[in-house]
Image (cartoon, rainbow, N blue to C red):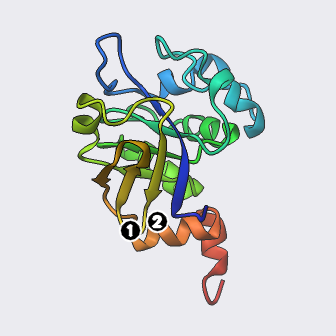
């Protein structure tokens, strides 16, 4: 897959009532007890370690998987580890109706794909996206699909800046690639 097209197994973050979990904050994504870990490659083992019902996520997740979350994913602090832990696991992208502003910017700057999917809650509520389903995401076109269920839904297309940063690898590499750098 390219930096703007993804295909992988979905992990739908549901609560005990079967609803997308909203307002997952950076402490639930990567607990502050692990902030002493400085090697990005080691951070994956702690992803979602403080989110009830999802503490075993690192042992189940695999490269290319796509996280599906509720509104305001990544709320809270500017904890970079909350982005890096997913990259360390090889997670390909995160889809959510909305993201915490700082989390979204940290992910974009890191070259980690985060895509806003306003119709996500409805598709999950209808049972049209389940954990284990294969998701195809076209960030350029602004479309996602679950081919096995015949489901297609809209995403906000990646902005040109977000696409450029993703293709470069991160904000720093993008800056270096600019004329006069």
Q: Quadrant of the C terminus?
A: bottom right
**Residue 20 higher or lower than 168, as above or below:** above
Query: CA gap, disc 1 to disc 2?
Result: 5 Å
Mark 1, Cα crowd under 10 Å, few <14 / some 14-19 / many 20+, is: few
| Circles 1 and 2 in contact, beta carbons < 8 Å | yes
| Residue 146, image x, y percentages | 40, 46
| Residue 67, image x, y percentages | 48, 37
Residue that carries the numbered disc 2 in the rendered image: 162
Q: Which of 107 and 56 lies nearest the eye of the viewer?
A: 56
**Residue 35 higher or lower than 116, as above or below:** above
Mark 2, Cα crowd under 10 Å, few <14 / some 14-19 / many 20+, is: many
- Report the disc number at residue 159: 1
Q: Residue furthest bottom?
A: 180
Based on the displayed image, in which of its 4 quarters is residue 73 positioned?
top left
Residue found at x 67% / y 41%: 63
Based on the displayed image, in which of its 4 quarters is residue 89 positioned?
top right
**Helix or strand or loop: what does disc 1 sit on?**
loop
Residue found at x 63% / y 70%: 168
Residue found at x 25% / y 35%: 121
**Helix or strand or loop: what does disc 2 sit on?**
helix
Q: Is residue 39 left or right of residue 133?
A: right
Q: Is residue 160 visible?
A: yes
Q: Is residue 133 left or right of residue 16?
A: right
| Residue 81, image x, y percentages | 61, 36
Residue found at x 52% / y 26%: 29
């Amino acid at each position: 897959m390219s930096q703007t097209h993804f295909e992988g197994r979905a992990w739908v973050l549901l609560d005990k009532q079967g609803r997308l979990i909203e307002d997952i904050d950076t402490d639930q994504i990567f607990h502050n007890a692990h902030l002493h870990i400085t090697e990005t490659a080691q951070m994956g083992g702690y992803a979602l370690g403080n989110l009830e019902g999802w503490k075993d996520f690192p042992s189940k997740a695999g490269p290319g998987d796509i996280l599906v979350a509720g509104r305001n994913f990544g709320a809270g602090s500017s904890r970079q580890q909350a982005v890096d832990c997913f990259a360390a696991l090889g997670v390909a992208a995160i889809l959510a109706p909305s993201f915490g502003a700082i989390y979204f910017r940290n992910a974009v700057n890191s070259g980690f794909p985060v895509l806003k999917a306003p119709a996500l809650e409805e598709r999950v509520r209808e049972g049209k996206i389940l954990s284990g389903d294969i998701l195809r995401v076209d960030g350029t076109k602004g479309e996602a699909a679950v081919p096995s269920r015949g489901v297609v839904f809209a995403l906000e297309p990646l902005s040109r800046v977000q696409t450029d940063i993703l293709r470069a690898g991160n904000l720093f590499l993008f800056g270096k690639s600019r004329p006069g750098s």
